[in-house]
Amino acid sequence: MFQKWPVKYFIFTPVKFYGILYVIYRRIKTIQLTNCFLIFPFEKGHFKNVLKKHPMKNLHYLLFFVLLVTSCASPKKYLANQNYDAAIGKAVHKLLKSPRKAELMATIDRAYKLANQQDLERVKFLEQEGSPRNYDEAVDIYRRLKNRQALVNTVTPFRYNGKVYDYPLVDYDQKLIASKRKAADYLYAHGNKLMQNGDKESFRKAYEAFRKVKEYTSDYTDIDQKMAEAHDKGMSRVLVQAINNTHLKFSPQFMDNLLTIDNSGLNSDWVEYDFRDMDRQMQYDYYVNINLNNIQISPDQSEEKDYTEQKKVEDGWNYALDSRGNVMKDSLGNDIKIKKYKELKCTVIETHQHKTCQVNGVVEYLQNNPSKLLRKVPIGTNLDFDHSWARAVGDLGALSEESKKKCQVKAMPFPSNLDMVYEGTDKLKLAITNVIRNNRRFIY
């Protein structure tokens, strides 16, 4: 089905995946599964060299590779690995698509019986043990039994090799409803108990417990209030603030502009970033302090250099005279004229203006309770002011087109020290944004 694939489809950037892929290569140098042939176009010892020579920018190819391998796995392979539901799902899908593949029914029958036996034994043990915490797992098992039965019923009854494959319909609803009721009672009490611990992790676990209670039953009228309380108390709130420790005095607008950062992708289910301290009563769990500590600005610098251009141009004419001083005539009797030339000179004085600004600081990650410094990340940015202009002294007619363009540029005033910093705001914001995004793992 597949020809040899280009090596580039199997190349992945992160070093930590080299070993994984090499093991896969060693174990399945040639994968031959039902309706699928995957050929590796490289030999032993060549794999790591290929990876180093062809780095990729992301993990898309790894995901593609894994999906390719798993999509090629046959129902029998899933069955052999005791992945019964995957075997049933794959076989049912193929059978519905191609009813002639009747041999798949034997795989479905075997996987269906083994999966049901495994689940029924497990749920029987959970119910006999009688622990309230077991009913949440029982809900999952009864759901799985019900969904598996519905899936198999899409292809049964089915006749193959003189045998009719059909299964009695089992009503799991009563067991499912009873398990949900008992699971909800346990989870509601367990959630309330977790709320008493007073720590973030417990609040988050309580929220998940209350969420399942709401999913299982509508009997608890205060469940939305419980979920809101658990979510609010389990949320980690982060205040990002800019602090000026330099000798320059910046306007409040400039400091606010530094924090005008796109926070998409920063907030999560349990972490919320604030870039303005809008509520003085808010208790923040983390502080991200952007400290501007040092600003170095060079003095105004001007450098001059000059060069001279020359050009010969026509400057009228003179009559050609013979040795006697008479005007010479050409063959037609006309006076002979000789062109006159003059040499033009012009000096171009070029001026280059230069000024630099370097802003250095550090981003501190602080935990509030308990108070702890988590991380310090240096930041910095540079901004250069460069402007060149020229003026001409002499006869402008001697100048080339390039020199004329230079002389059309006018001098500019040097920016002030504050203006230099303000002009570099976008670069500084980009540096701050990158630091915040790259260190999200320290806040949870």
Image: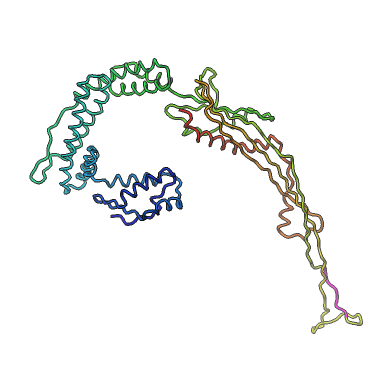
> Is 301 one of the magenta-colored residues?
no
Q: Nearer the viewer, residue 251 or 119?
A: 119
Q: Is residue 242 above or below residue 48?
A: above
Q: Quadrant of the C terminus?
A: top left
Q: Is residue 344 above or below residue 417?
A: below
Main SS, magenta region, reads: strand
Q: Is residue 157 left or right of residue 183?
A: left
Q: Position of residue 363 (x, y in %)?
A: 57, 31
> Which quadrant of the figure has residue 354?
top right
Q: Is residue 188 left or right of residue 416?
A: left
Residue extending furthest toward the right: 324
> What residue sits 47% from the left and 27% below the top?
272
Q: Is residue 291 above or below residue 423?
A: above
Q: Nearer the viewer, residue 435 or 131?
A: 131
Total labels drawn: 0
Q: Which residues are magenta?
A: 315-321
